Image (cartoon, rainbow, N blue to C red):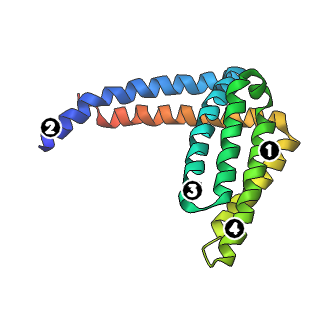
Amino acid sequence: MVETQIMTTRRNSVWHLVAGIIMAVMGVYVWFNPAVTMVALAMYLGVLFIVVGAGYFAFSFSGDSGWYMLVGLLDIFVGVIFLTNLGVTAASMPVIFALWCLAVGVIQVVTAFRFKSAGFAWGWTMTAGILGIVFAFLILAYPALGTITLTALMGAYILLYGVVEIAEYGMTRPAA
């Protein structure tokens, strides 16, 4: 049984190498192509916002929460905007993202106060809300820096993911 698992791991380890190389190249590509990255990010985030918003909206009925419904509708609205205006969205993504962070941050702060008055744990919700508001104002103050930061962080994450995959290949490949 153990030998079968070792052989399967060794046989599949080549996929770590392939995935690692692709991800590393993609990470570098993201660094040097911020405009394309922002359009792709606009599309990805548009779909993500719609899916998450639908989840919040659906949960609002079972959780009896108008705030979750509001966040859900806001997320769906932002997702539709992102998908229907990809070029404009890519150019203005830092400002749109900052406004979304601001709205959600305010809702989280209000929700934290509701949690506190109901006797629930509220500290993490308050912290997330305050950080969202601060992050929003920083992006609004420096939108170009926001674009550079978003693409630099994305590229770095993707590149590091690739390096980890390559390292996993090195650790699982058969000994010579």
> Which residue is the site of mark 4?
112
> Which residue is the site of mark 1?
99
Q: Secondary structure at mark 3?
A: helix
Q: Calculate the distance from the C-alpha at mark 3 to the C-alpha at mark 1.
A: 26 Å
Q: What count of labels does the image hold?
A: 4
Label placed on residue 4: 2
Q: Secondary structure at mark 2?
A: helix
Label placed on residue 61: 3
Q: Position of residue 40 (x, y in %)?
A: 64, 25
User: 142 above or below 27?
Assistant: below
Q: Earlier in the sequence, mark 4 or mark 2?
A: 2
Q: Residues within 10 Å of mark 4 (few under 14, many from 20)?
A: many
Q: Calculate the distance from the C-alpha at mark 2 to the C-alpha at mark 3.
A: 48 Å
Q: Are marks 2 and 1 in contact (CB under 8 Å)?
A: no
Label placed on residue 11: none
Q: Residues within 10 Å of mark 2 (few under 14, many from 20)?
A: few
> Measuring 14% from the left and 44% from the top, which residue is drawn there?
2
- Quadrant position of the C terminus in the picture: top left
Residue 125 visible, this orientation: yes
Q: Are marks 4 and 1 in contact (CB under 8 Å)?
A: no
Q: The disc labelled 3 sits on which kind of residue? A: Phe
Q: Residues within 10 Å of mark 3 (few under 14, many from 20)?
A: few
Between marks 4 and 2 in the image, the one whose residue lies nearer the viewer: 4
